[in-house]
Image (cartoon, grey):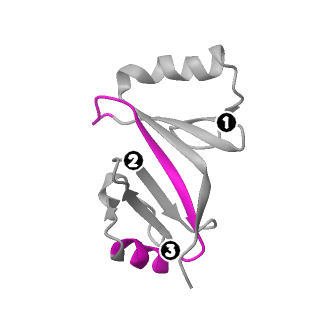
């Protein structure tokens, strides 16, 4: 059986501190997206069928877009990705102990969270 991936429900926009407040104002006040307030320090917005999370990442100098992929079995997916030569980058942001997912990076340097849908 081939490992299956589907698009997740979360997109993360990681911003340097100097772009954070103006970006939140843009999506909240200028565009008028409905704000989600349930997630820690990130500020979320309903972005059609997905959620857009805006978060400060103090170690970067420009915005980064992070995407989410779902898979039914992360262990199998991790092996499949490793065999395909995909780079893991789990050190980029800590995940909870026992979390069934991890971080990868695409050839275009886009970070992806790969996880089981009920990994949290």
| In front of the other: 100 or 106 | 106
Q: Nearer the viewer, mark 2 or mark 3?
A: 2
Q: Which quadrant would residue 15 be assigned to in this image?
A: top left
Residue 79, above or below 107:
below
Are there few (<14), some (14-19), or many (20+) residues within 10 Å of tag 2?
few
User: Residue 60 at x, y = what percent?
Assistant: 29, 34
User: Residue 77 at x, y = what percent?
Assistant: 47, 74
Q: In the orientation shown, which residue stands out farthest toward the bottom?
A: 1
Query: Which residue is under mark 3?
Result: 74
Sequence order check, earlier mark of 2 and 1 = 1
Residue 30, above or below 9:
above
- Is mark 2 in CB contact (under 8 Å) with mark 3? no
Are there few (<14), some (14-19), or many (20+) residues within 10 Å of tag 1?
some
Q: CA distance from mark 1 to mark 3?
A: 26 Å
Query: Which residue is under mark 2?
Result: 110
Check disc 1 and report its element: helix, strand or loop: strand
Q: Classify the position of the N terminus by image quarter.
A: bottom right
Query: Which residue is under mark 1?
Result: 47
């Amino acid at each position: 059986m081939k490992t299956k991936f589907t698009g997740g429900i979360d997109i993360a926009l990681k911003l340097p501190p100097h772009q954070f407040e103006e970006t939140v104002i843009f999506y909240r006040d200028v565009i008028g997206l409905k704000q989600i307030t349930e997630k820690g320090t990130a500020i979320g917005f309903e972005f059609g069928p997905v959620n857009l999370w805006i978060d400060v990442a103090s170690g970067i100098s420009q915005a980064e877009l992070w995407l989410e992929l779902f898979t039914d079995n992360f262990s199998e997916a991790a092996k499949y990705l490793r065999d395909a030569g995909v780079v893991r980058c789990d050190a980029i942001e800590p995940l909870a102990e026992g979390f069934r997912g991890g971080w990868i990076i695409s050839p275009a340097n886009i970070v992806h969270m790969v996880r089981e849908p009920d990994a949290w």
